[in-house]
Amino acid sequence: MQLSKDDLLRAYRIMKTVREFEERLHVEFATGEIPGFVHLYAGEEASAAGFCMHLDGRDKIASNHRGHGHSIAKGCDVHAMMAEIYGRETGLCAGKGGSMHIADLSMGMMGANGIVGGGPPLACGAALAAKKLGTGGVALAFFGDGASNQGTVMESLNLATVWNLPCIFVVENNGYAEATSSKYSVSCDDAADRAGAFNMPGVVVDGHDFFAIHEAGGEAVRRAREDSAPTLIEVKTNRYYGHFEGDAQTYRGKDEVKNLRANRDCLDLFRARVTSADLVEDAELDAIDGEAGDLIEDAVIKAKAASRPAASELLTDVYISY
Ligand SMILES: Cc1ncc(C[n+]2csc(CCOP(=O)(O)OP(=O)(O)O)c2C)c(N)n1
Ligand SMILES: [Mg+2]
């Protein structure tokens, strides 16, 4: 699939913004100022960017507890996300959701989700609605290797085929569900192999390779949009930090992350590929690095300066009235 120079710069900007967001949160969380749990997506950026670049305003995504990258890639406001994580009233959900409940329906981001395996059924619902209403939209669910073992995911895969839904299922296999290796918990080498049982294509892609993900994502979105047919894609990826911030990670090899950062980093691989092919210059990517850094710095400053929700707002935004 041909990518224009604008596409390449956009891809890098998304990935770099997510990386800066996550690296900064890692530092900020350690100060104790951020409430609740935070699960970082650093290392997995190519997945969110590679898929979401195919989506537009008609399309919806369902996320999981590791949702910052998905949210940024789908277009959620970075300042409002940061304020949400700090629990401030300027947050995307008025500071009441925090990291694990970031949502922006106006951007088609149906929500981070603390229920492992909770996203795929939502994506089926959104895909069914798009189909019935004839919007031309598709729905995509991001979930992990651990979630891939949940009954909700099997039911969703089945319904997507039975109902011919414009749905894409993305297993981000980062090798672990909390401290449990996917080699132990997943019944097959590739979770994508399960797709055959649900009569849909199952595709495995290298999660460090933006271009491979973009290619597979493009075909899956095309199948969904044009043929109203689902696809399961497994992204073999890695997280750079613990399951949650504060995880001692005693279950990981000593140099595991160091080696990944040095040899398999999706941003570094992207830079090497586009610059060696003379598609983009280093200086252009350096400029994006600077802009992403400034954006996150500004977002943190503004989030810290914002107020917490007033006590009088305790029960607003909690229940919805139809
Ligand atoms: C239904 C349910 N079961 C268990 C948990 C506890 N839990 C939270 S995250 C997690 C692991 C998820 O692993 P995976 O799906 O691979 O996502 P990753 O954290 O690796 O991105 C578990 C078991 C939960 N939140 N919800
Ligand atoms: Mg996992």
Image: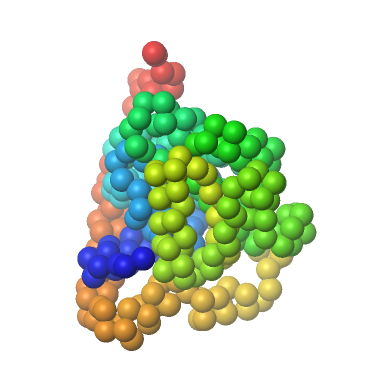
Q: Quadrant of the N terminus?
A: bottom left
Q: How many marks?
A: 0
Which of the two residues, 273 or 73, is positioned nearer the viewer here?
273
Residue 124 screen position, x and y as percent = 52, 34
Whether residue 216 is visible here, answered yes or no, is yes
Q: Quadrant of the C terminus?
A: top left
Horizontal placement of 227 versus 80: left or right? right
Whether residue 248 is visible here, answered yes or no, is no
Which of the two residues, 49 or 130, is positioned nearer the viewer here?
130
Location of residue 98 by image quarter: top left
Single out the residue that lies furthest toward the top: 322
Horizontal placement of 282 versus 120: left or right? left
Residue 236 screen position, x and y as percent = 58, 64
Above or below: residue 143 compared with residue 190: above
The residue depicted at 69 percent of the width and 46 percent of the height is: 197
The residue depicted at 40 percent of the width and 50 percent of the height is: 222
The residue depicted at 43 percent of the width and 77 percent of the height is: 269
Residue 80 screen position, x and y as percent = 30, 43
Location of residue 190 by image quarter: bottom right
Horizontal placement of 34 versus 199: left or right? left
